[in-house]
Image: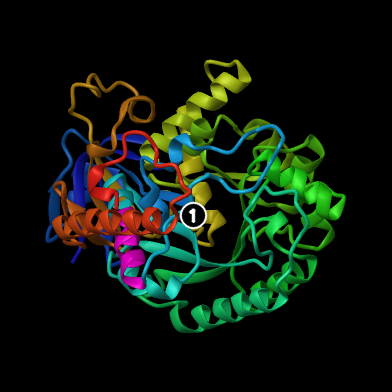
Amino acid sequence: MTIVIHNAVIATVDDRDQLHYGAAIAIDGDRITAIGPSAEVLARHPAAEKVDGTGKMVMPGFANVHTHFTMTLARGVFEDLSPPHKPPFSGGLSPIPLPDMTPEERRAMALIGALEALRSGTTLVLEDTNDVDDYAEALAGTGMRFLLSERAYDRVGTSIGDPAPFKLDRALGQRHLRTIEAAHKKWNGKADGRIRIAASAWAPDMCSPELLKDLRALQQQLDTWATIHCNQIWGEVAAVKAHRNRLPTEYLGDLGFLHDRLVCAHCRCMEPSEEKLLGEAGVTVAFNAAIAARRGLSPRIADLENYGCTIAMGSDNMAEDMVEVLRTGLFMERVRREDGRNPTPEQALRWATRNGYRALGVPDGGWLKPGNKADLIVVDLTGAHMVPVLRAVSTFVHQAQARDVEAVMVDGKWLMKAGKVLAMDEEAVLAEAQRVANTAWPRLFAKRRDLKVPDGFSPDALP
């Protein structure tokens, strides 16, 4: 059945950033078949299901190229517990650990993350995690597109950003590699190709040279993508210098780990020579703008892009709102550049859509043209914060809220329509996520009496 959305604004994110007013877009199966003046497209598709797009904008769905759905459990906790930016470094991104979770609890937190992502217009996600098998089936059921990246590391006894001696557990690293291979065999290509499996290295200071070489070989054998946290915090840089006498990106480059199918998350604490290395390798940088702002550290996006990196966008921890990420990225870069005009809204939107799709191996998605994947969102332009609409893309980037996304389509199928989520039981997902939080956090605090409970913690989540 052909679907035609008509009388809408169409933001294509094509090579010319074309913006069509009073236009229509036709979808047949999983593909876009036409974009043009409403009268012409409607005349060519008289039997189509017609969707009135008056007061709406149709645009590509967002690609979130770096997130951790299960860390939604730390929402309201980790945001204000960032690690220090100066020595002494002790390791970890928070003085309070994330509670251990059962497979059922991980599934619940993955679904609340997916729900927020869907409601904010995300259609493709790179999820960096362990235990993909616990919730891959649940995520497949959302109808969204996922690159699920199972994580490997072989340093034990600490966490990212600790310059203390490297304690190696080679057997652990090999188990992680076997888990990646098993997940790829079980899940890659499932759900009509919407689920794919990638390989993740936790961070340069959490992986031995041997593990990184083995992981790169496995990634090539599986013909898939890879990701790594890179130069995320200054403690990580200090740790790699202490362990390898190299900067993190130099360490990765020496091992052949930098390549054009790699997504490097963060890249915030980086020397210009490292930025150049990433660009020469054709790496994609995940600009996780919102979490960067929360942590008080941000990458030099203009330099990374000028050196040859692809810039895409991610939400990282505790939040999946890509509308917020998009706007925060624009604002942060204008502050860094001391330039009130650059980057442009169109450039930022490209980072959050087309660049991310291309980086994750879907070059015919993330932008709208006949023949491309029908992964798109419909945005309400009639709110008091949006009117008057004079330059629709600029208005969206500067003013929109996640609640303005009223419909989401992936592979030509509606996952949300008229503000109603069709692919999930929203009330059940919300209730289960709160129940898990009220169970997991008391369990942690009862076990770890040495931990200081943050001020303002809900009594329902205490032992």
Q: Is residue 126 visible?
A: yes
Residue, x 64% and y 75% (percent of image)? 172
Left or right: where 375 falls relative to 360? left
Q: Amino acid at mark 1?
A: Tyr
Residue ranking furthest to the right: 245
Depth check: 223 or 202 in front?
A: 202
Residue 349 on image: x %, y %: 45, 37
Residue 228 on image: x %, y %: 63, 56
- Among the 4 quarters of the image, the one containing residue 365: bottom left
- In reply to whether residue 109 is colored magenta, the answer given is yes
Residue 351 on image: x %, y %: 51, 41
Residue ID for mark 1: 357
- In reply to whether residue 144 is colored magenta, the answer given is no
Depth check: 128 or 414 in front?
A: 128
Depth check: 22 or 259 in front?
A: 259
| 366 versus 394 height, above or below | below
The image's colouring method is rainbow
- Among the 4 quarters of the image, the one containing residue 380: top left
Left or right: where 458 falls relative to 245? left
Q: Across the whole image, how many numbered discs are drawn on residues?
A: 1
For the residue labelled by badge 1, is the local secondary structure a helix, a strand or a loop? Answer: helix
| 166 versus 333 height, above or below | below
Label 1 environment density (alpha carbons within 10 Å; few <14, some 14–19, many ≥20) = many
Residue, x 39% and y 69% (percent of image)? 194
Task: Look at the magenta stretch and give its main secondary structure.
Answer: helix
- Which residues fall within the magenta stretch? 103-114
Residue, x 39% and y 57% (percent of image)? 444
| 252 versus 379 height, above or below | below
Quadrant into which the N terminus falls: bottom left
Residue, x 31% and y 70% (percent of image)? 104
Q: Is residue 343 visible?
A: no
Residue 370 on image: x %, y %: 38, 55
